[in-house]
Amino acid sequence: MKGYIPEDKVEEIKSRTDIVDIVSQYVTLKKAGRNLIGLCPFHKEKTPSFTVRQDKQIFHCFGCSEGGDAVSFLMKVSQISYPEALRQLAAKAGVVLPERAVSRSEKEHLSIREQYYRVNGLASAHFARNLALPAGKAAREYLAKRNIGPDAIAMFTLGYALDSWRNLRDYFEKEKISLLMAEKLGLLVPREGSGSYDRFRARLIFPIEDTSGRVIAFGGRIMGEGVPKYTNSPESEIYIKGKHLYGLYRTREEIRRKGFAILVEGYFDLIALWSHGIRNVVATLGTALTHEHVDLIRRYTQTMAVIFDSDEAGKKALTRSIDFFLAGNMRAKAVVLPDGYDPDDYVRTFGKERLDETIKQAGSMIDYYIDHVIGERKGLEEKREALRQAIALTKTISSASERDLFVRRVSERLGIEQDVLIKEVRQTAAETAKTTLQAPKEDKKVSIDAVELQLVNIMLNFPEQVPIIDDSNVLLYLTTNDLKGLGELIIETFKQNGKINAIELIKTVEQKPVREKLMLLLVNDSPYDETVIDRVIVDTIKKIKQRWYKERRKDLQIELRKAENEGNTSLSDQLVLEQKKLIQEEKGL
């Protein structure tokens, strides 16, 4: 796959790419000494273990062991191939790649996912062009009526599907796009028997993007009366609605800047708020909030303001979502608008300042839950259900003080003695513990020789010194198999390429304790001064060899005693000669 992009261009892309800029698009990083840390985007965690080292242009997570450079990060976070990651980085860095037609064999090598993204991208551009056509006049007028101006249209790439059964299909045929692939993405609907037709017809189109800005699906809204009001792309290999949030790619920097995100339910709610200057907003995609949504938001902020309806359905939605926020260690506000208003209506009626103030004055989600969900329960059965839900929630509150406060307030609201509620909570926790499988025991402690570790660390940090270390044959004297194997691989890689990729090499180490120790050394400051590294290498090699000779002499002495006790004169003479040889070699160090 590297053959698609010349090697000199690959090096130019990497040299002009800053890993911090790339990672920051997906993770909120904070300074920690020379490093930057944040919550890992590849696994769920509450305490940051994801580390970026800008001067070395590497990242590593000490929680899940993912690591690499900017290219491998983008590949992993966006689930794309090496060439596609390079092309995206080239576009960001302003590196011009040779333009040429994609050959048939190259098309076959493109991953299915990349082809899906390409097809959706073409469809999005087609819908956007339609909106500007005379046939799109009614759609433009509808948007203007809802105060959606040219800036919002351009920002969210809004489009229009013509009132035709095969407008998009004809476009795909003209562009020689696989109709079967378009069917799998839900852009075309197969007819009974044979053929297919456009899913979206006479509708406003809202392209849905992932956090890399790639179009993964579409939403289509009818402009007049009729059902269904919305037609949406079905889930596909690249789109699962419970894992994506509408608008996040466009609003994440504002979310970072403001320090919190506002969550709404629909496309128009988000775009209306954005058009009125409230731009730290995201929207769910026709589904209830999921823990994947919360994990996604946590990459950019720890604080969320969730706009709920005040009706029973809104309260149920709050009850379902509070668990995710608590488990994700997020601060969440419950913003409840007056009856009959959604965010779109509210901001158009009362303006930005009024909504800003409503959000500012909103209480925490826990407070709202206690006061308006638990507090409004009547009768024994309703209170029993409220108690059951409250007890379940306590398990997700990690802070002991916050958990104590929650229990106290719930007991007051339900009219239950606090000691009784605490007993119920502890009993539930004990029962849960009984049914929870014990975590597997940690691997036995692995012995890591400090001097050998120092040698390999030098090889990783100063690859230009690898030939000197290779000439010394010091690897023959290493006793830690993982370090010896890694050292040999470093030498082999350097001989072949004239350079090494330290993180990729460390990943080959089998023993996790050794691997993690090397990664820790790599992401931290090097303890070696470049001006004296030659002396350090000489001393390190000498120490390793001296220790090896010392141990070998001990082994020979044991073997010699055994041979003498057994009366094996021939073996005794041989071992004595080897001892003398070792002594002479050691003197030459």
Image (spheres, rainbow, N blue to C red):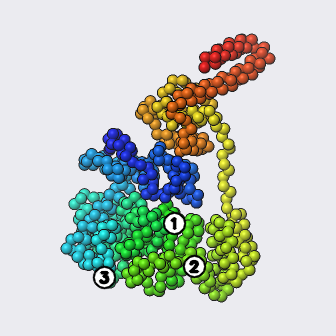
Left or right: residue 347 compared with residue 154: right
Q: Looking at numbered disc 1 in the image, what kind of residue is underneath it?
A: Val
Crowd band around label 1 with a 10 angstrom C-alpha radius: few (<14), some (14–19), many (20+): many
Residue 61, position as x, y percentages in the image: 54, 50
Residue receiving disc 1: 294
Dot 2 or dot 1, earlier in sequence = 1
Left or right: residue 43 compared with residue 130: right
Q: Hey, which residue is sitting farthest left in the picture?
A: 134
- Mark-to-mark CA distance, 2 and 3: 37 Å
Residue 256, position as x, y percentages in the image: 46, 63
- Mark-to-mark CA distance, 2 and 1: 19 Å
Point 44% across, 75% down: residue: 265
Instruction: Evaluate whether residue 267 shows in this view.
Output: no
Observer-nearest residue: 483 or 218?
483
Crowd band around label 3 with a 10 angstrom C-alpha radius: few (<14), some (14–19), many (20+): few
Dot 2 or dot 3, earlier in sequence = 3
Q: Looking at numbered disc 2 in the image, what kind of residue is underneath it?
A: Tyr
Point 55% across, 24% down: residue: 473
Q: Which mark is residue 59?
A: none
Q: Looking at numbered disc 3 in the image, what kind of residue is underneath it?
A: Gly
Residue receiving disc 3: 224
Residue 577, position as x, y percentages in the image: 68, 12
Residue receiving disc 2: 368
